[in-house]
């Protein structure tokens, strides 16, 4: 089952990349960077929510523990990907990468991470 969770995570990366491309090519040109980040966070939560709901419907967990494990695996993969890709491929500094975790500065990326971790459990109970 863990292999399926790993494979199911890959489209989430594609969703996030497309979300970022849409932000940069559309509304990101008209909003301040912080506002653009916040809108992008909201759209990521919505689109990832639809994906995860569909996935948990067609690939249901057998227990709350399994659903939570799926979310934790996805969270770990997302954070690892974000920092390794962001630093080594996109050449962003560690400080720049950590800025998205500063809720006091209005950076709300952590909401996406919490959603990725908890949505499988929520959808398990809703299904």
Image (cartoon, rainbow, N blue to C red):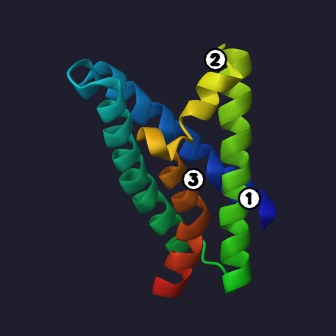
Judging depth in this view, the residue of 78 and 103 nearest the camera is 103
Q: Is residue 12 above or below residue 66?
A: above
Q: Is residue 68 in view?
A: yes
- Contact between marks 1 and 2 (CB within 8 A): the answer is no
Determine the secondary structure under disc 2: loop
> How busy is the neighbourhood of tag 3: few (under 14 within 10 Å), some, or many (20 plus)?
some
Is residue 127 visible in the rendered image? The answer is: no
Front one among 6 and 100: 100
Q: Residue at x 65, y 64 (%)?
A: 71
Quarter occupied by the N terminus: bottom right
Among numbered discs 1 and 3, the one appearing first in the sequence: 1
Left/right placement of residue 108 relative to residue 113 reads left
Where does the image place residue 40, in percent across and percent down from the top left? 36, 39
Distance from disc 1 to disc 2, alpha carbons, whole Å, reads 24 Å
Residue hosting label 1: 73
Question: Residue under circle 2?
Answer: 92
**Quarter holding residue 5:** bottom right
Q: Of marks 1 and 2, which one's residue comes earlier in the chain? A: 1
Q: Disc 3 marks which residue?
A: 113
Q: Position of residue 123 (x, y in %)?
A: 50, 76
Give above or below for 107 relative to 126: above
């Amino acid at each position: 089952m863990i292999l399926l969770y790993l494979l199911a995570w890959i489209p989430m990366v594609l969703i996030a990349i497309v979300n970022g491309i849409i932000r940069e090519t559309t509304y990101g040109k008209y909003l301040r960077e912080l506002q653009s980040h916040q809108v992008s966070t909201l759209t990521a939560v919505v689109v990832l929510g639809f994906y995860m709901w569909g996935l948990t419907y067609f690939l249901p967990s057998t227990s709350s523990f399994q659903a939570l494990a799926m979310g934790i695996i996805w969270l770990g993969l997302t954070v690892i990907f974000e920092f390794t890709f962001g630093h080594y491929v996109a050449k962003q500094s560690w400080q720049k990468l950590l800025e998205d975790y500063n809720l006091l500065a209005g950076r709300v990326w952590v909401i996406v991470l919490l959603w990725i971790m908890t949505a499988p459990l929520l959808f398990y109970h809703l299904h």
